Amino acid sequence: MESAVVKLWSLLLLLFSSSAWATDLTIAAASSYRSLLTELADEFEQRENVSVRLVFGSSGKLTTQIQHGAPYDLYFSADVSYLQHLQTSGYLSGKIITDGYGQLVLWSAKAGLLPESIEQLSEMKSVTLAIAQPRHAPFGKAAMRVLENHQLADAVEGQLVYAENVAQAAQMALSGAADMAFVAVSVLPSDARDDNQLLVLPLSDERLLKQSHAVLKRADDLNLAIQFSQFTQREEFNPLKCKHGLIPGNRAGARNE
């Protein structure tokens, strides 16, 4: 199995290095960063006259890709523990930067379907619940922690429908493939965030969704990668981060490592 993975990545590396993928910066990012980084990358491209390519996926799978040599310049993760692992293994250049905290919600495209509290899920036996795969998706892992803390994991186990990442979980609820979904606020359209469509789920440990990024040691243009990292840290973008469901600030345990 390992040799098959290596062969696959050898092929992908050839594709990445071809002229079809010519770009100044290639950034790997958790799906929860999509709306925010799309705006930031567009602004950076205009100001600096460069090309930025964004690759989105689950944090766990992106980490595996980086370990197998994927040609990314920066990595934005929805769970800082993945970055810490890469740092320990020598893949990062410089420190880990805390961007803020993700917000987990239970969401439904259908108004009025949500329970008034998470505990009421135990009574809703007929609904299906989309969730990002907890093994490699931080928002899925955080959702499972919420269910466990409320003694609901066993009660709803048969109702869970697994998605590859948090954006796919939201799409399942939007398309009707699931009745509700555990998702990041950041993956929801701004017009789909009414109070009767989402239930905010506070975490007992906010570090589970500590959104962070770092420059990768293998960056083709290290200076440009550092420049983009510094660009995203400007205070002028704090309102934009809030707009896209990322809560900036230095909470307990929030520090640049």
Image (cartoon, grey):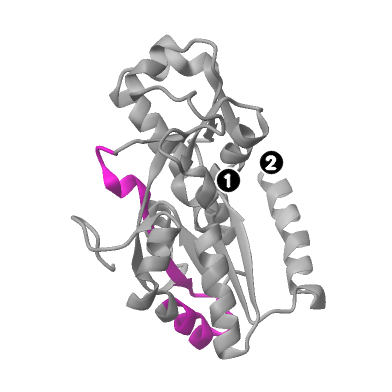
Is tag 1's residue or tag 2's residue first in the polypeptide sequence?
2
> Can you say which quadrant of the picture contains the C terminus?
bottom left
Residue 216 magenta-drawn? yes
Q: Which residue is mark 2?
A: 1
Which residue is more in the foreground, 173 or 3? 173
Is disc 1 in contact with disc 2, using a CB cutoff of under 8 Å? no
Q: Is residue 140 left or right of residue 208?
A: right
Question: Residue, x 62% and y 66% (percent of image)?
Answer: 54
Question: Dot 1 lies on which element?
Answer: helix
| Mark whose residue sits in front, 1 or 2 | 1
Q: Which residue is mark 1?
A: 167
Which residues fall within the magenta stretch?
203-229
Q: Position of residue 152 (x, y in %)?
A: 37, 18
Question: Residue, x 54% and y 11% (percent of image)?
Answer: 126
Q: Position of residue 199 (x, y in %)?
A: 39, 34
> Can you say which quadrant of the picture contains the N terminus?
top right
